[in-house]
Image (cartoon, rainbow, N blue to C red):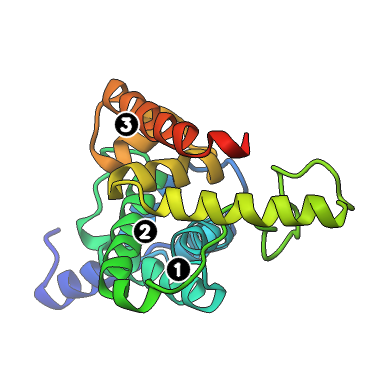
Amino acid sequence: MALQPAQSQFAATVRPVEVPIKPGEFSDAELMLRVRDGDDSCYNYLIEKYRQPIIHFMFRMVRNQAIAEELAQEVFLRVYRSRQTYRAEARFSTWLYRIATNLGVNHARDTKHERSAQTVYLDEPDPETGTTPDVADPTPSVEQDLVRDERMKAISQHVMALPERQRTAVLMHKYQGMDYKEIGDVLKLSESATKSLLFRAYQTLRERLKDFV
């Protein structure tokens, strides 16, 4: 029997049943497709899964915890606003980090004049864990503190002086643990081009930081 107009309208507005999501039950892309179909529980699950990684990523880009949290919130708002046009043609994480990267780059461009006098420490202790992977001794001497401070300032200056795409690739590679393919997908580069990009970036940093190695 054909649906009457009223019935058709009702059928079109029926939302899928929201059920608890078990880890590993669906891929991220499948969850996002369910978000597209109206299942907000899947959206909440994705936020819980990626909120901290995205905040950490944004923090590495802007070096301000409050701004990083605001930008992360905007990332997820854009994810939700784009749900109807989402297509599972790439990994969800690739799509997500592309949104985050674009937002972070735009913010950096818009606030460049405000950051000109700031000191950015790319290997200072993580704001949440307090750990610094590059420092082996948890109780350095005064001399070691001074050397470390000088090293961080140098790393800050030279990483932030890298070309925009190289800088973003280094942040994703070093701090997010993303592989060449994932970074390439975000930056819309081939895997070989991504390797070349990172090679040039690290080569530049090694040359400019040779006095601190």
Label ID, residue 100: 2
Q: Quadrant of the C terminus?
A: top right
Quarter assignment of residue 72 = bottom left
Looking at the rendered image, the disc whose residue lies closer to the viewer, 1 or 3, is 3
Q: Is residue 115 left or right of residue 133?
A: left
Q: Position of residue 212 (x, y in %)?
A: 61, 39
Label ID, residue 72: 1
Please name the residue shown 48% across and 38% down the image: 173
Q: Quadrant of the N terminus?
A: bottom left
Density class for disc 3 (Cα within 10 Å; few <14, some 14-19, many ≥20) is many
Residues at circles 3 and 2 in contact by the CB criterion of under 8 Å? no
Amino acid type of the residue that numbered disc 3 sits on in the rendered structure:
Leu
Do we see residue 45 in this rendering? no
Q: Is residue 36 above or below residue 213?
A: below
Residues at circles 2 and 1 in contact by the CB criterion of under 8 Å? yes
Amino acid type of the residue that numbered disc 1 sits on in the rendered structure:
Ala
Residue at mark 3: 197
Q: Residue furthest top?
A: 192
Mark 1 and mark 3 lie on one chain; the one further toward the N terminus is 1
- Element marked by disc 1: helix
Q: Is residue 107 left or right of residue 133?
A: left
Q: Nearer the viewer, residue 98 or 121?
A: 121
Q: Is residue 191 left or right of residue 17?
A: left
Residues at circles 1 and 3 in contact by the CB criterion of under 8 Å? no
Q: Position of residue 111 (x, y in %)?
A: 31, 75
Q: Is residue 171 above or below residue 54?
A: above
Looking at the rendered image, the disc whose residue lies closer to the viewer, 3 or 2, is 3
Amino acid type of the residue that numbered disc 2 sits on in the rendered structure:
Ala
- Element marked by disc 2: helix
